[in-house]
Structure formats: structure tokens, C-alpha cells
Amino acid sequence: MTRCLGAVRRGWQLLLPILVLTQVLPAAALSVLALAIDPTGRWEAEMAADPAALPAGFWADAATMIGALVGGSLVFGLVQCLGWAAGTWVIARQAAGEPVGFGAALRYGLRRALGLWGWMLIFTVILAVGFCLCFLPGVYAGFALAMAGPVYLFERRDPIGRSHRMLRERLGLLLGRVALTLLAVLGFSFVAAIVESAARLPFGATPLEDPGTAVGVILVIAVAALLTLPAHLAQLVGLVTTYAEQRAHEGPVNSGRLAAELG
């Protein structure tokens, strides 16, 4: 906890704008996109008139919605990886007492984003398969892959196997640290989701059809996305500091060496 607070205290002035740019704004844009292409309001009206028939253009609307959301999520994931890499660079270099800057952090993030994104796609498939097979394998896979992102950024080899070995070798330490990080992320995300759901209710099922309600619901989405900022910060700082602690338990290592490993 002390290391996490130290990382936040040193880096919040850079970490917050990085996370707003690469996590908050893309998430808000994706939510607005989902709302713009959501046909469920029209479907409900048509099915109320004729419950026995599918709404007009049902399959085309569904395919369009799924395709747009999948494509948007892939783009969002790439931008998100840019932010994670940039934030990790800031945390590591500040811990070593080295100079950091917003532009330099984003340039580092751009160099590492594509590789990290590719691995994140693999991690997502593994987690999805685990949860589909049974809930507990999915939970185990989540903890086993928790260090995979930092492993890729610092070591750039075998992130899946290495992360799993870290869990097996120090089960208690890793479970505890990752569980605390997860609780913080879920807590902040839950509050943001509740606020957004309650604030969107007065705007109805199709708020973008009217300019007045459209502005209101977009502001609600933006504020709700901003409320998730502590969750993104907790995830980034929690996982990076947990990785650094794990490396310290494995053998002699200092902040300067970890910063140098990022490249």
C-alpha cells in the first residue's frame, strides 16, 4: 500500500492526463457509439405493436451493432494499451528518480502499444474460455494472467508462462495484492455505473433523437466515464507495484534496473 501511495503521489500529475486521454475519453466515445447504434428502443416499440413478429431489419441492425461495438472495442483496447505502457514508464522512471514527460511517456506507449495489445487479445480469449467452461477456471486465469502485461513491458518474453509461474511461486502475495487491486477497480467502477444508470433514466430509451436530450445524455456519459478515473489509476499502479514487489522477492533488483528494462 505504501508503494502504491508513493507512486500516486509522485506521478499523479502525469498519470491522470494520460489515463484521461487513453482510458476515460475512449470509453466515453465507445458508450456514445453504443447508444447511437442501439436499436432496442425501436425494437421495443415495434414489438409492442406486433409481439409475434421480429422488428423490421432486426438481423441487419443486430449485425451492425455487434460489428461496430467489436470494432470500437478493438480500437479502444489499442489506445488503452498505449496508456498502460505510458503509465508504466512514468511509474518506473519516477521510482528510479529519472526525468519523465507527457510527450516522452506517450511516445514510449506508442512503441509498445501494438505488442501489448496483441497479447491482451490472447489474454482476453483465455479469460473468456475460462469463464465459459466454468466460473472458477476463469477466476484462476484472471489471477494467473494478472502480471502478464507488466511482464511483457519489462521482460518482453513469455508473458503468459512467466505470469503463471509468479502466481505459483508466491501464491499468497500475488493473490492478496491483485485481489486488493481488483476490489478497488470494481468498487470505483460500480459507483460510476450506478451514477450513470440513474442519471440516464430521465432521458428515455432514445435520447439522441432530440438535440436537448442528446447533449444531456452525452454529458452524463462523460461525467460517468470521468468517475472511473480512480479505477484506472488503481489498476495501473496496483499491478505495476505488485510486479516490482514480485521481482524484488525473486532476487536483487532496484528501481534503476527496472526502469532500464522498459527500454
Image: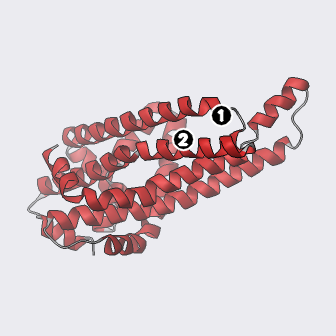
Decide if residue 51 is in sight here.
no
Residue 43: where, in percent of width, then height? 81, 34
Q: For the C terminus, which image quadrant? A: bottom left
In this view, 95 is above or below 179:
below
Quarter assignment of residue 219: top right
Count up the numbered dots.
Answer: 2
| Mark 1, residue position | 203
First in residue order: circle 2 vs circle 1: 1
Residue 99: where, in percent of width, then height? 19, 73
Tag 2 near tag 1, CB within 8 Å: yes
- Farthest front residue in view: 212
Type of the residue with mark 1: Phe
Q: For the N terminus, which image quadrant? A: top left
Residue 114: where, in percent of width, then height? 47, 69
Residue 110: where, in percent of width, then height? 42, 72
Taking the spot 48% from the left edge, 44% from the top edge, the residue there is 223
In this view, 48 is above or below 191:
above
| Mark 2, residue position | 220
